[in-house]
Amino acid sequence: MILTQELKKVYRNGACEVSAVRGVTLEVLDGDFVAIVGPSGSGKSTLMNVLGCLDAATAGYYALDGEDVTQLTSDGLARVRSRKIGFVFQNFNLLPRLTAEENVALPLMYMGVPVRERRERAEQALGSVGLYHRRGHLPAEMSGGQQQRVAIARALITRPPLLLADEPTGNLDSVSGGDIMRYMTRLNAEGTTVVLITHDDGVARKCRRRVEMRDGVIRELRP
Ligand code: ADP
């Protein structure tokens, strides 16, 4: 699913340069479930942004699902993102004025799926995270854990092969966080490749594989 070689990312602000990712070679097989752990500032989010085709690497090679994405333009990256990747963020990133169902259906709208099919698929996706009964509610009317389940339904509605999650349990209490990890584990069992960033060792240990990032480089941790 993911193959990188000597991936690097340098931020340049005027005369100031920050090497956030300093040569990452990583292979994630189809169906894997990987946690990226490491201290704050070690480059985890930067790596995730590159893996998620939200940002281009400065140097190195990256193939996603067999496609070399290293040389793609921003339009090309957007196309790969919408076809291949679902995103889940720490702050849920739901649109506050849309209902749960409308939030979940949004990626299908961008893909031009007809309204009736959008509704049916959104209801089904909400059902799969146990929130069919909350489909008409606004995000502010739901708990953090419920909002994150809506975000998971939204990430998966296009049936992407890869789910990227940046601190998905970071804003949740341990019970809701455990709930989210159960949904992620189930999705993984159903075939979705999952890569998540976490500060929480308990969360990381629920994943099949742990990779630690420090000062922009990675190393594999023992199971
Ligand atoms: P983590 O997710 O592990 O906390 P980040 O990837 O956010 O780490 O940051 C890695 C390094 O890159 C840090 O030194 C951070 O200050 C720097 N950095 C992150 N984003 C930017 C940016 N847009 N411009 C300049 N420096 C950045």
Image (cartoon, rainbow, N blue to C red):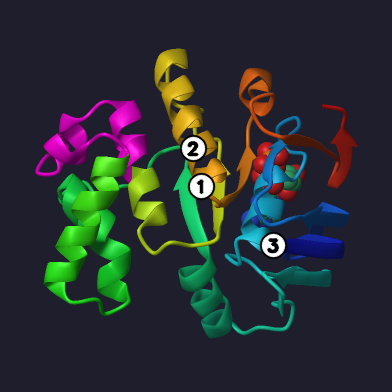
Residue 1 numbered tag: 3
Q: Nearer the viewer, residue 36 or 33?
A: 33
Q: Nearer the viewer, mark 3 or mark 1?
A: 1
209 vs 67: above or below? above
First along the sequence among labels 3 and 2? 3
Inspect the image, locate mark 2, and give the three-letter code of the amino acid beneath it: Arg
- Residue under the image location 66 percent in, 83 percent down: 72
- Give the CA separation, mark 3 to mark 1: 15 Å
Query: Which range of residues does the magenta coloring cover?
Result: 129-150
130 vs 78: above or below? above
Whether residue 103 can be seen here = no
Residue of label 2: 186
Residue 190 numbered tag: 1
The answer to the question of whether label 1 and label 2 lie on touching residues, with beta carbons closer than 8 A, is yes
- Residue under the image location 57 percent in, 76 percent down: 77
Kindly state the secondary structure of the residue where label 1 is placed: loop
Left or right of 134? Residue 160 is right
Query: How far across and down, in percent of the image, does residue 164 sit?
Result: 56, 50
First along the sequence among labels 3 and 1? 3
Circle 1 packing at 10 Å, graded few (<14), some (14-19), many (20+), is few
Inspect the image, locate mark 1, and give the three-letter code of the amino acid beneath it: Glu
Q: Nearer the viewer, residue 140 or 67?
A: 67
Inspect the image, locate mark 3, and give the three-letter code of the amino acid beneath it: Met
86 vs 167: above or below? below
